[in-house]
Image (cartoon, grey):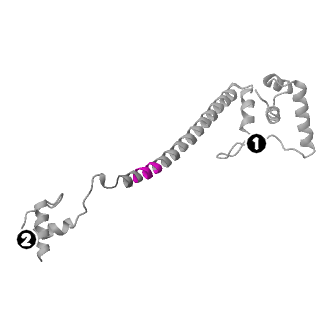
Amino acid sequence: MQVTTKTLIAMHADGLSDQAIADRTGVELATVERVITTHQNNLAAGRATAAATPAPAGTAVPDAADLLPWAEAHVEASIRQAGARARAALELLQTRRRTDAELQGIKRTEQELEARLAKLRARAAELKGGRGKQVKPRDYVPAEVRAWAREEGIPCPPAGVVPASVVDAWRTAHATA
């Protein structure tokens, strides 16, 4: 377990003795004493501030990496459990962020490939020329043919495909008119 100076200072601010901090963290007692003494001297000289107060709700905790070892080494079981839950939650978030980033990359690649495929299909259609299925453009507007058929009393369905016989009659009538 990696223990930082901030962790040692926070544990001391929570009332643990230097010996208890050394026992829980595995840091040599002389090192703990030096860190705490230096911090207290810096406080007295105005070069340091007291241990950080909890961050307001909704704000980021900048020293979360320091809090985890402190919590996991804490004397209270509830704090150790909270530290373990926090570590598990952070690991879950880290995994999810990696997954989301990979999924976004896959989505971008899919879009790029779809665009490239559309270009390739268009080019293939150009190269095929007239060999594919040809769709003859209409020379009439279906609504106009239906209206003409109603006026002339010719049966024509109100929707769907206009029967070829009705279209042919319409063409004949309009070709001679």
Query: What is the residue that sits farthest to the bottom in this orientation?
Result: 177
Relative to 107, residue 69 above or below: above
Residue 3: % across, % down: 79, 30
Residue 70: % across, % down: 75, 31
Q: Nearer the viewer, residue 2 or 106?
A: 106
Work out whether mark 2 precedes mark 1 in sequence or the reverse, and give the earlier one: 1
Residue with the mark numbered 2:
152
- Residue at the spot x=91%, y=31% of the render? 34
Q: Which marked residue is nearer to the observer: mark 2 or mark 1?
A: 2
Q: Is residue 8 magenta?
A: no
Tag on residue 39? Answer: none
The quadrant in which residue 13 appears is: top right
Q: On the rendered image, what quadrant is the C terminus found in?
A: bottom left
Rounded to the nearest angstrom, the CA distance separating label 2 from label 1 is: 90 Å
The residue segment tinted magenta is 115-122
Going by the numbered disc 2, the residue's amino acid type is Glu
Residue with the mark numbered 1:
53
Secondary structure under badge 2? helix
